[in-house]
Amino acid sequence: MKYFYQNMEGVTKLFLALWVFVFLVACEGSQENVLVENSLEAYITSSNLPVQRDSLIACAGSGQTGILVDPSNLPVSIIFFPLEEISDVRYFETSSLPDNFDDFSQYTERELGLVPILDGTLMKFAREATTEEVIGFVTFIRNGKLFLSNRIHLKDSFRPTLYLDNEASINVSSPLMPQFSWDESPEDLDAIYFHVVSDESNSLLSGTYTFESNFQFYNLDNVVLNITDPNSSPSLIANNEYLFSVMGISVDNWVNFLATREFTAEE
């Protein structure tokens, strides 16, 4: 009997050790599955929608000049192009520069005001100045999908957007189809250029992207992306005044510079 009880005692200890091991593993697994409240990861999971990451155009810049001016006077603008029939527009941001940009548990939703740009053709979140390098994502829902922008690196703390008023050159040899050109940003940081032609009422006539530092209105030969209303036929009216704006944007969607130039469509 003594041998039996000794054996039972050993079995009991082994059972308890195994139970503790299983419990710890289960706890560790459950902790790994806990979603960070208000995180982008939690939002993606709770939405239970397919994620689309290649169709939400967004960038960010700093300052209060040109098309970035807004009544709030907040110095940082997170700009995006709102497709038709979108809902639940949100903005998520890290607290510092993450090691893994796609670890969505590190992005927390921020309650920022939405401001229309160019008669609402573009929208932006207005934000206070940053003290740390942070990464942001814009999201919205459309047609049963959760759209997620490419990452936006906010750099106003160390590389504020440069304002180069009247640095853009305009060739009006073809008066109603002027040719625009501009210099690259210092340090050659631009990956793409976004240019806008707007009228006196601040309505967008054309919004186009090129890899080249030139664009002719409204010639799409070197345009790689066009946000102009596809149902419109943009044209200039002789003797009317217009504004040309161009942004040099880095590969991580920071606006390196903004140049603007007023012009009159000559006959």
Image (cartoon, grey):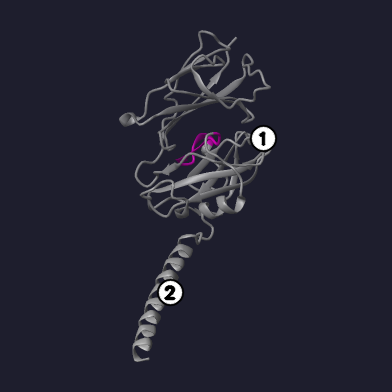
Q: Nearer the viewer, residue 230 or 257?
A: 230
Above or below 180: residue 98: below
Name the spot of residue 159 as percent of width and height, x first: 36, 41
Above or below 260: residue 27: below
User: Marks 2 and 1: which is nearer the front?
Assistant: 2
Name the spot of residue 173 as percent of width and height, x first: 50, 8
Q: Nearer the viewer, residue 181 or 66?
A: 181
Name the spot of residue 1 as percent of width and height, x first: 37, 91
Q: Along the horizontal axis of the image, is 58 left or right of 161?
A: right
Q: Which residue is mark 1?
A: 84
Q: Which residue is mark 2?
A: 19
Name the spot of residue 222 as percent of width and height, x first: 48, 16
Identify the residue at horizontal 46%, vertical 67% (top origin).
26
Farthest residue in the bottom direction? 2
Q: Along the horizontal axis of the image, is 154 left or right of 220?
A: left
Q: Quadrant of residue 51?
A: top right
| Numbered range of the magenta stretch | 55-67
Name the residue type under label 2. Trp
Assign the C terminus to one quadrant of the image: top right
- 56 drawn magenta: yes
